[in-house]
Image (spheres, grey):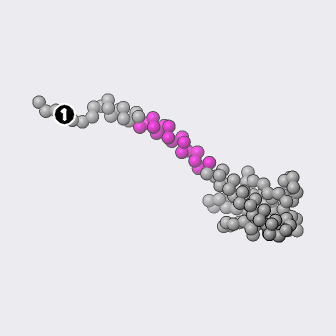
Amino acid sequence: MRKQTGFTLIELVMVIVILGILAAVAVPRFVNLQSDALVAAKKGMSGAVKSAFAIAIADQKTFPTVSQLANYVQGENVLAVAGGIRVDINGTPYTVPTYTDATCSTDSLITATSDKVQCVGTIP
């Protein structure tokens, strides 16, 4: 009598069930990675503008204007706009708010280039 080799239907079903359980556990962990990466990029760009703000103060020995601050920020497509510094993250523009008072409550305006930035916020 010949011995047949191969998998039984029960064994194949069990393998499919186990793979399904592993997929059900792994997929939700990777779904939110894109939104987590965007949050991290926003925090990183806000930190870069805050660092540039500190460098500008040290370099100029006074608070910079929004236009001057934009020149200190490293990156592509960095512009001084109304209310802050516009930066691009994956081609999408975001504005890091800048303020003309130390309490971070009065927005700075690009038209008032003589107004000094005294506080830098974070991208909402």
Residue 78 in the image: above or below residue 121: below
Residue depicted at 35% across the width and 32% down the height? 13
Q: Which residue is under mark 1? A: 4
Q: Position of residue 50 (x, y in %)?
A: 75, 59
Please identify the residue farthest to the left as the structure is shown. Answer: 1
Q: Position of residue 88 (x, y in %)?
A: 67, 61
Residue 74 in the image: above or below residue 28: below
Is residue 14 one of those drawn in magenta? Answer: no
The reply, left or right, for residue 74 in relation to residue 33 is: right
Residue 85 sits in quarter: bottom right
User: Is residue 33 or residue 118 the one in the foreground?
Assistant: 118
User: Is residue 94 or residue 99 the one in the foreground?
Assistant: 99
> Can residue 65 be seen by looking at this rendering?
no
Location of the N terminus (image quadrant): top left
Residue depicted at 69% across the width and 53% down the height? 43
Q: Amino acid at mark 1?
A: Gln
Residue 114 sits in quarter: bottom right
Q: Give the magenta range.
A: 19-36
Q: Position of residue 36 (x, y in %)?
A: 62, 48
Residue 106 sits in quarter: bottom right
Q: Residues within 10 Å of mark 1 (few under 14, many from 20)?
A: few
